[in-house]
Amino acid sequence: MGNRIYLKEMSSYQAATAAQKKRVGKNPYYDLDRLPSQIMREEMTEFLRIRSREVSISTIYGECNYYNRICSFLQKRAKGVISFRDRHKEIWLRQFKGWMLEEKISLTYKSHNVYGNVNMVQSHIISYLRRIVEFTGKTVDKRPEQEKDIWELEKLDIPINGNLIKNYKSINFIGIPQDDIREELKKGIYLNLQGEAISCVQREMTAMRRLTRYLAEKKKEVLSSRDITREVVEEYLIYLKTENTSTKHYHSELNRLRAIMESIGKVCDYPNLEGLFMNRDIPPTRQAAFKTYSDEELKRLNASIVKMDEQYARVMIIHQMLGTRISDTLTLEMDCLYEAGQEFIIKIRQMKTKSYQKPVSEELAELIRKAMTYTRERYGQTKYIFVNESDPSRPLQYHRIQDKVVAMIHKENLLDDNGRLFGFGTHMYRHYYGAKLTEMHLDDFTIAKLLGHSSVQNVKYYRKMSNQTLADETREVLQFLSDIILQNLDGWEPEYEQIRQDACFK
């Protein structure tokens, strides 16, 4: 009994909701006696203590199964081993995979992404063992955070302009092969973090990884940012257009690459990086297809959405009824709804632009109030209506709702009008909302206000999407005008008489 760690004693259990505690069950535990040595028991105890601070009790409960299988592996393949440090990580993983094959445990599983593609992903149990080995093998790094190769954002001494619905925790510099460029990049990223959103900084990291991989392969003599010349940039641009086929749309990436290069030039005093890129180097923004759902597609989606867990169903229905961006829906606050006379008004705090207010129907207001009640009953007083289960102080995370909806689409085999599986098209609900506003013949100013736009500039796209509706509504008028013209063709030249006769036979 003394070598058991009960889930009820863990810190994440104390912060769990009633629903999470019910899901965990009566009194589950980790049986440390299944580990081969006392040192391994101590290592696992410390791992679980830290793990319990990082994830929800539901995750800890789900990982009990991984732990038990790893114990079975250790009992068979690790006799005489006293610590997880005794073997290199790669040896542990290779031996574990061999044991899994013997036990007929799959090394991979199918994962469906938001575009309907199927990828083979490494089994969670392998990742769990890797996490244990990496935890027990690491030493305490006492260097300042900005000197490390992996930065934990919460440990930096500067405020981070984060994204409430996407949980960025770290910045990883390990993928930069050139030592000097890696250190220079750290300085540039540290500078940019003080003025840019973390999402922009992460795109700068992506751009630098692609560039440095190219340099390592094609330009091995370039070891520092001071070695990057205009000639090197031109050759890189040619490479992107001719050899790199992963994507052909580099507008955003090259803009971020120029930004980080200029920052490195400033902080490292490298004049060669100033004006390294010219405006003509950056391709124009790709004109995205402005798509929306058809009425029938929306009916099929909603018929399955309402079968989901009630709060996830509410967030998706509220999202499409509001016509907001998904970030604005997930960050709706408890004080967002109020009454003004006979109207219900909602305050929408847009993450990208300024806040705005608009009236909503009584039915939508009631749906929002039910979502509020659901959250209060399970999590108490919170800032947001839709919250992160493991940390109710934060809004529901984008990837969480994405995973739920994509899983539902594949389970129900939901197909669009072209016979393809639906993707996670949260912004298409906004397009649908905007297109319907144009079909109601509202003026551009009103449509812009209801969508939260600061100007009427983008309303034209919603009107283009309603061209078919416009054609349907004006067909009768156009036919009437055509009849008038045809009647006036009498007595004209023979070719015009033929036009009239052809029209009469249609």
Image: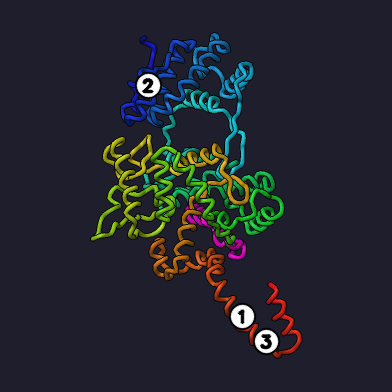
Residue 246 rendering spot, x and y as whole percentages = 65, 48
> Would you say residue 269 sits in the magenta stretch?
yes
- Residue count near mark 3 (Cα–Cα under 10 Å), binned few <14, some 14–19, many ≥20: some
Horizontally, is 1 left or right of 293 in the view? left
The quadrant of the image that shows the N terminus is top left
> Mark 3 highlights which residue?
489
Horizontally, is 407 left or right of 496 in the view? left
Distance Cα–Cα, label 1 vs label 3: 10 Å
Which range is magenta?
258-284
Q: How is the image coloured?
A: rainbow
> Would you say residue 191 sits in the magenta stretch?
no
Confirm or deny contact between disc 1 and disc 3 (CB under 8 A): no
Residue 77 rendering spot, x and y as whole percentages = 58, 12
Q: Amino acid at mark 3?
A: Leu
Q: Is residue 340 above or below residue 188?
A: below
The kind of secondary structure element at disc 1 is helix
For residue 25, the mark is 2
- Residue count near mark 2 (Cα–Cα under 10 Å), binned few <14, some 14–19, many ≥20: few
The kind of secondary structure element at disc 3 is loop
Residue 161 in sight: no
